[in-house]
Image: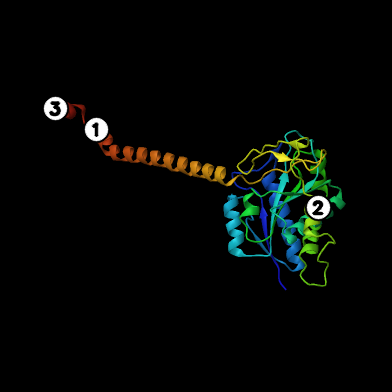
């Protein structure tokens, strides 16, 4: 039976996501998302992308694209960012709630990436993230290592193909095309998996700030040595207000430019005629 997976490369266009030195998160997200999509497509899954080039769609747009297309799973690709370079390393998966499929995908992908050499930072429930909350199918947001970690970037670059294969394998284990494959009905039940999802602790928290629209909030640490995940989509209200302000500013500036151009065009004939007419004519006309 065919399975459809919506693949979302985070950020894009004017929104680079996290930036470290000359590296932009949006580029890593797109490159990895396309590679994983190809792996899954080769395995027989139907793949739909929210973007395949460098363009921006808001988190709401991405959720709408996914909901309009339909699908069995929504998979969003991101990279994490710490407030200090090399402060944290590792991979983490974000989910909305206890959906069994989303939890299986998150757990399996983390384990597959851990086998490559990444630190497994576990699963975290993030109910405020738009692409997790607004999608109608099970959704997982993957934080594929820290973009401002030298070690994570080394693994990301040197083992890129293995990373794409590992993520695809984790998805296949959780969402097999046929019942003969391991459903990763991983002996663990949703409640067992959720037991590993961190709750906010006063003594194990950290604040992490993004450079672009999609980042918000302070994020709880899963353990004292585990990094909080980045919020890659902003809160509904903040994001909506920001987008409306941008649109209003663009419209306002466009209107002012339009009025200026029209004013110059309308006055141009008079200016030209005045400059061409002899000065004596102008003086006699005034008299």
Q: Mark 3 and mark 2 in contact? Answer it, CB < 8 Å.
A: no
Q: Quadrant of residue 280?
A: top left
Considering depth in this image, is 222 or 151 the residue closer to the camera?
A: 222
Residue 274 - label: 1
Residue 97's spot in the image, x, y percent?
70, 54
**Which-is-in-front pick, marks 2 and 1?**
2
The answer to whether residue 167 is visible is no
- Label 2 vs 1, first from the N-terminus: 2
Vertical relation: 277 (above or below) 236:
above
In terms of secondary structure, where does tag 2 sit? Answer: helix
Query: Which of the two discs, 3 and 2, labels the residue nearer the N terminus?
Result: 2
Q: Is residue 153 left or right of residue 214?
A: right
Would residue 161 be found to the left or right of residue 12 on screen?
A: right
Image mark for residue 172: none
In primary-sequence order, the first of circles 1 and 3 is: 1
Mark drawn on residue 284 = 3
Residue 119 appears left or right of 59: right
The CA distance from mark 1 to mark 3 is 13 Å
Query: Of residues 85 and 223, which is closer to you in this image?
Result: 223
Which quarter of the rendering shows the C terminus?
top left
Q: Which residue is mark 2?
A: 110
Q: Can residue 73 be seen?
A: yes
Number of dots carrying numbers: 3
Q: Nearer the viewer, residue 252 or 187?
A: 187
Q: Is residue 269 left or right of residue 137?
A: left
């Amino acid at each position: 039976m065919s399975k459809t997976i919506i693949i979302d490369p985070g950020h894009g266009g004017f929104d680079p996501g996290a930036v470290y030195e000359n590296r932009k998160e949006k580029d890593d997200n797109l490159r990895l998302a396309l590679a994983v999509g190809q792996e899954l497509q080769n395995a027989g899954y139907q793949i739909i992308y929210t973007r395949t080039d460098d363009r921006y769609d808001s988190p709401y747009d991405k959720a709408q694209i996914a909901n309009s297309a339909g699908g069995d799973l929504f998979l969003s690709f991101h990279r994490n960012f710490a407030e200090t370079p090399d402060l944290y390393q590792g991979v983490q998966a974000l989910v909305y709630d206890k959906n069994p499929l989303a939890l299986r995908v998150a757990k399996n992908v983390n384990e597959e990436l851990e086998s490559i050499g990444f630190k497994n930072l576990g699963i975290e429930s993030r109910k405020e993230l738009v692409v997790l909350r607004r999608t109608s199918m099970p959704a997982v947001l993957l934080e594929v290592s820290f973009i401002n970690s030298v070690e994570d970037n080394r693994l990301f670059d040197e083992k890129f193909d293995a990373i794409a294969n590992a993520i695809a394998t984790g998805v296949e284990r959780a969402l097999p095309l046929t019942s003969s494959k391991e459903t990763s009905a991983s002996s663990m039940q949703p409640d067992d998996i959720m037991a590993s999802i961190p709750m906010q602790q006063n003594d194990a928290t950290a604040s992490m700030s993004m450079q672009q629209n999609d980042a918000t909030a302070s994020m709880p640490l899963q353990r004292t040595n585990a990094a909080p995940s980045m919020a890659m989509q902003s809160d509904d209200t903040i994001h909506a207000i920001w987008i409306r302000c941008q649109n209003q500013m663009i419209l306002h500036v466009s209107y002012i430019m339009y009025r200026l151009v029209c004013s110059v065009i309308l006055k141009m004939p008079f200016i030209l005629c005045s400059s061409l007419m002899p000065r004596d004519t102008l003086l006699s006309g005034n008299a």
